[in-house]
Amino acid sequence: MPAPCLDDTDGMRKLRHAGCKTATKLARMRQSKVGMIKVGMIVVRAARALVLAAGLAWPAAAFAASAEEAVVTRVLQAAVTGPSAAARVAPRSFDIPAIAAFVLGTYWTSAPRDDQKDFVAALAQSIGRSLTRRPLSKDPDAFSVTGTRRLSSGETLVTSRLKLANGNIANLHWRLRGSPPLIVDVSVDGRSTAVTRRDDLQARLRVNGGSLSTLVTAMRSGASIDP
């Protein structure tokens, strides 16, 4: 059997031609993938802008890196969407009973069970209102989650940025605990809303003689209660 000819010029030319065609095809595939990714990113941004403009919630929580980030993203989406969305999200995203016990202190432990239930419901409404108290930007990049870290207490801290309608940026730090995780406090530019609520509500209780039912009535009316 004759040995294969290594100097077969025609064969080598065909081999080089086939290699060039393959390389060109691969390059086009790479370019096509990059182009499709870029187009996809543009489509996603445009879709998010349309969804927010229509007053709906963009499902960014699906892309969150952790369960805690997903909760914070859901709340931020609701805040940007509007009061109705915020009111729906607050009761299932915040640990309302835990916040209620913290802000009331000894008033909570001494209150009848029915008064506690009424206060929890009023507090959920108050938290929902507070999410949209300040006019927020409707831009597609109105908010972003910027980081997550575990605290020595076992809680998780999620940091985020929120753009206001006037263009200013608010820095929000969320503390979450439990499984599934729920929010127990949010600090806005370094100011704890749980501590602000505690100081305000306990001062009102001292003035009204410790009547939780009177306080609940005021909270339901939204009379300067929300921090």
Image (spheres, rainbow, N blue to C red):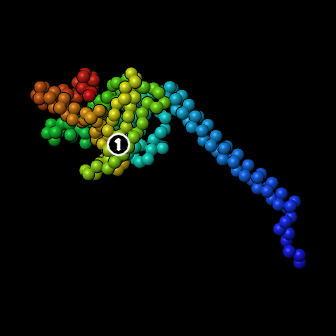
The residue at 40%/34% (across/down) is: 76
From what the image shows, is residue 6 above or below residue 171? below
Instruction: Judge left or right: residue 38 versus residue 191.
Output: right
**In which quadrant will I find the C terminus?**
top left
The residue carrying mark 1 is 158
Q: In which quarter of the image is residue 126?
A: top left
Q: In which quarter of the image is residue 163?
A: top left
Please indicate, yes or no, whether residue 108 appears anywhere in the rendered image.
yes
The residue at 76%/56% (across/down) is: 19
From what the image shows, is residue 186 above or below residue 21? above
In the image, 100 versus 69, the foreground residue is 69
Instruction: Judge left or right: residue 137 versus residue 210.
Output: right
The residue at 25%/42% (across/down) is: 98
From what the image shows, is residue 27 above or below residue 218? below
Please indicate, yes or no, whether residue 117 appears anywhere in the rendered image.
no
Spot occupied by residue 46 in the image (x, y as percentages of width and height): 56, 31
